Amino acid sequence: MIVTRFAPSPNGMLHLGHAFAAITAHDLAMDAGGRFLVRIEDIDGARSRPELADAFREDLVWLGLTWDEVPAQSSRLTRYDDVAQQLERAGLLYPCICTRSDIAAAAEVTGPEGPVYPGTCKGKALQPSEPAALRLDVAEAIRRSGPLQWQDALAGYQQADPAALGDVVLVRKSEPASYHLAATLDDAEDGVTLVTRGEDLFAATHIHRLLQSLLDLPVPTWHHHPLIVDEEGRKLAKRRGSLSLADLRASGMNGIQLGTDLRAGRYRQHSTH
């Protein structure tokens, strides 16, 4: 049975890009007689606003979607911590105190997600009192896992290339888990068989496939769909004030018709694959 999910973060209102992502996941599951899940990814520190989860549900109902809701990330912190400790004991994580500006200044390579961490803290003895993130030793992880592949429903089979992203953070300095660790564990826990998300997260899948191998997790298929973009061709974003679904609802727009228009491609899309 196909199981998909929509996993918004409550750090801003949903916009058209989120609507398209939710509709894509919903329709792929429903058309196959499967299940569509909603999971609230609410561990983004002070940016998380729990009250927005109810607004998200109102948006999805307005779009005409039905779903099964699974536990939010904030209820899964023990699992994240247990797995991080497991990886640390296995010698696959190391602490890092570098800031984003430190990395930008020292990086010599730019990867698909920006400057690649140059390994500044790897092998260093750090003071226990210093706030530190935990990074995955990707080279060692690849050595243990061997060659890996994954399948995208649109782009086909992919040779996993986690080294292109460098030693990514799995546990952030002030948060219990990074997106890479939390999403990978959550999708496995929730039985997701088809991970649908925007093409901006395509590269992250190389790391997620590596984590699945290290942790002996089931391997889903992925479906990285095009993004809805603005008049300037930019991805819609909360930080740029993209018009929210709540605003569209308040204006009297019909959510069912909006869903029909999104399915028909009447909003500008951008694809890189």
Image (tube, rainbow, N blue to C red):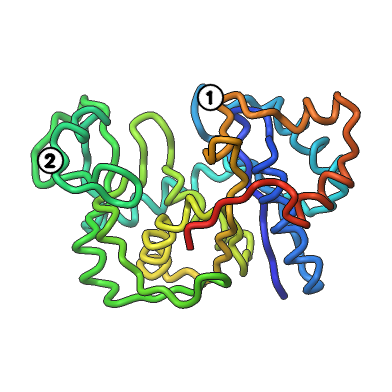
For the point 25% across and 51% down, the residue is 167
Q: Where is residue 7 drawn, in percent x and y?
A: 63, 47
Q: Is residue 89 left or right of residue 127?
A: right
**Which residue is the extreme one toward the left?**
124
Q: Which residue has dot 1 on it?
A: 47
As drawn, 183 above or below 161? above
Q: Which residue has dot 2 on it?
A: 120
Q: Where is residue 231 drawn, in percent x and y?
A: 60, 36
* Mark 2 crowd level (few <14, some 14–19, many ≥20, 10 Å Cα): some
**SS class, disc 2:** loop
Q: Is residue 150 left or right of residue 252?
A: left
As drawn, 261 above or below 52? below
179 or 271, nearer to the observer: 271
Q: Where is residue 49 drawn, in percent x and y?
A: 62, 25
Q: Amino acid at mark 2?
A: Thr
- Label 2, label 1: how far apart the Cα atoms are: 28 Å
258 or 40, nearer to the observer: 258
For the point 45% across and 73% down, the residue is 150
Q: Is residue 208 left or right of residue 89?
A: right
**SS class, disc 1:** helix
For the point 22% across and 40% down, the residue is 95
Q: Count of labels shown?
A: 2
Numbered mark located on residue 253 in the image = none
* Mark 1 crowd level (few <14, some 14–19, many ≥20, 10 Å Cα): few
